[in-house]
Amino acid sequence: MQEERRIAVLRAIVQDYVATEEPVGSKALVERHGLNVSPATVRNDMAALEDEGYLTQPHTSAGRVPTDKGYRLFVDRLGSVKPLSAPEKRAIASFLDGAVDLDDVVSRSVRLLSQLTRQVAVVQYPTLSRSTVRHLELVALAPERLLAVAILSTGRVEQRIVELTAPISDDDLARLRSRVNLAATGEVIADAVTALRSLGPVDPARDPTLGDAPLADHTTAVAQVLADAMGNHRSDERVAVGGAANLARYGDSFESAVRPVLEALEEHVVLLKLLGEASPAGTVTVRIGAEGPIEDFSATSVVATGYGPHDDALATLGIVGPTRMDYPGTMAAVRAVARYVSRILDEA
């Protein structure tokens, strides 16, 4: 009973401190939260929580504020992530469903997440090396020029122009399209690239339709271009960032919390390290203060989760901000946006 009451006191202090940005006193807690105990009892509970390292008192005459340990206990005792309201879900779906391609999905996600949480949002582009080939398309632009298109499971679309050494007929184009798809469709990128680069001249006895020299040359040219397009993994370190202006709300803790985040926004590698490895779909990871991987961000919290099609976490999205944040609301928003982005990639 006593432990449950102290948890209730800690929860109330976290909620009030996040909302008011002021140290919280016992009288205010009793008045605002209906704890059904006297201010003296609450003061005793606050003293006990302080002794255990969950609260701290910035000034002798002030109330208490949560420590990183206090925030951690608060988050761990949430039980489950509170779902967003029906209007919030409809707003997310409406905003994200209008996206036209992967870049638009990422851009919209970062803007939406920063608006929902009033924090700095970070969305990693889907990791190319872990995606699979959904379809390869070849379109004739001219007798000796093709548009090669690779559609990946992440929703990413790579397009390249292929210059041929001789004209290609419609029948040969259809056979070539079939051959590259047979080699690469459904394969992870690394295996697809290997398979495509192995294509080239074939034994006419095994496949007479692909044994003539012009078509063999076309196969080599197209396969090489597609392999090069998919073999570019630079997107693995690409992130989109939004909501930097939200840091203005934390002017009182500029040196400890805001400056490191502002500096990190210029270094995508640092942001990726803060986000960490993509967690399984639906699992929200919360790292508070010194729990993070970088010492300079000891006054910063990160709330993140993985996203990707078919519940396969290909990348991470989340928020970065000072430890004084609305953890339940932020966790709900991060999870909801990740689910909708995953659904969009599923249906792409």
Image: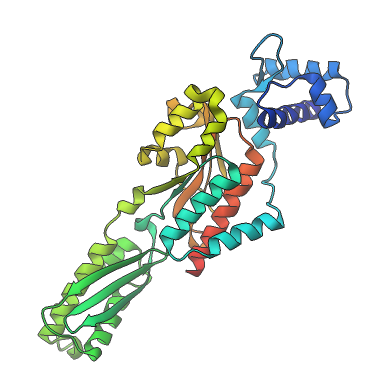
Q: Is residue 142 above or below residue 340?
A: below
> Split into 4 quadrants, where in the image is the N terminus?
top right
Which residue is located at x 45 percent, y 37 percent? 274
Q: Please name whichever residue, 24 or 272, is drawn nearer the observer in this view of the structure.
A: 24
Q: Quadrant of residue 56?
A: top right
Q: Nearer the viewer, residue 162 or 284?
A: 162
Q: How many numbered tags mark residues here?
A: 0
Relative height, residue 310 to residue 272 (above, below): below
| Side (left or right) of 68 relative to 276 | right
Q: Is residue 22 above or below residue 330?
A: above
Image position, residue 307 (x, y; %): 50, 54
Q: Nearer the viewer, residue 175 or 40?
A: 40
Estimate the x, y position of residue 233 in percent, counting from the top left: 30, 54
Answer with the quarter of the image where residue 72 lies: top right
Answer whether residue 310 is visible to the viewer in this image: yes
Can see residue 202? no
Relative placement, left or right, of 251 versus 268 is: right
Relative placement, left or right, of 23 versus 96 is: right
Q: 303 and 22: which one is in front?
A: 22
Residue 280 x/y as whole percent = 52, 51
Seen at 42% across and 65% down, the residue is 153
Q: Is residue 57 left or right of residue 171?
A: right
Which quadrant holds residue 75?
top right
